[in-house]
Image: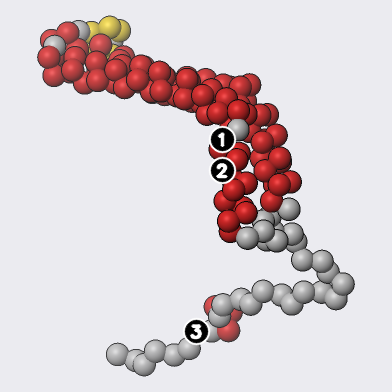
Amino acid sequence: MPPLSAPPASLEPLTPPAPQAGAVPAAVPGAGLSDDASTEVYRSVQNSLAFQRIRHSYRSFVFPVSGVFLAWYLLYVAAQAAAPGLMRTPVAGPVNVAWLLGLLQFATTFLLTWLYARNARTQRDRAALSLRWDTQDQLR
């Protein structure tokens, strides 16, 4: 076996470029605060009414929808196990009830993804962005 040689120069790790003269380094949020101070900022945000509303909005959508989808999926699995004759019933040509319900699982997934995105956009995104900016201001 031939001895290992050093990698070609093109594969050596890159070093970050040196800062240009007069360049101002980017501000890192919370860089001037101690760990205890930034922890207090985040705790105060977590206890704020705005954060609680965002969290409630998220949970009031996600938990019921997840439960409904899980029940719908388990119904499909239980029907496959308990009623194979029903699942083999032809619907149209080679498509039977099992195929139809299986394809509806995919359609339901896409529908729920769209509903979640719409709910987030209309119910939570603005409030969360506003809370984020307030938090960043407190950390400076």
Task: Please say whether residue 5 is visible from this viewpoint.
Answer: yes
Q: Quadrant of residue 79?
A: top left
Residue 126 position in % (x across, y down): 68, 29
Q: Is residue 34 above or below residue 39?
A: below
Please give left or right for residue 135 compared with residue 60 in the image: right
Contact between labelled residues 2 and 1, with CB atoms less than 8 Å apart = yes
Q: Secondary structure at mark 3?
A: loop
Q: Secondary structure at mark 2?
A: helix
Q: Is residue 15 above or below residue 81?
A: below
- Residue identified by numbered label 2: 43
Q: Nearer the viewer, residue 35 or 129?
A: 35
Task: Please say whether residue 54 is visible from this viewpoint.
Answer: no
Question: Can you tell which mark lies on residue 7?
Answer: 3
Task: Please name the amino acid that badge 2 sits on.
Answer: Arg
Q: Quadrant of residue 70?
A: top left
Mark 3: give few (<14), some (14-19) or many (20+) Cα within 10 Å: few
Task: Please name the amino acid that badge 1 sits on.
Answer: Asn
Mark 1 and mark 3: Cα distance apart in space: 53 Å
For image coordinates 59% across by 45% down, the residue present is 42
For image coordinates 23% across by 8% down, the residue present is 90
Q: Hey, which residue is sitting farthest bottom in the picture?
A: 3
Please give left or right for residue 137 compared with residue 11 in the image: right
Which quadrant, please, contains the N terminus?
bottom left
Q: Nearer the viewer, mark 3 or mark 2?
A: 2
- Residue identified by numbered label 1: 47
Q: Nearer the viewer, residue 88 or 111?
A: 111
Mark 1 and mark 2: Cα distance apart in space: 6 Å
For image coordinates 71% across by 47% down, the residue present is 138
Contact between labelled residues 3 and 1, with CB atoms less than 8 Å apart = no
For image coordinates 67% across by 43% down, the residue present is 135
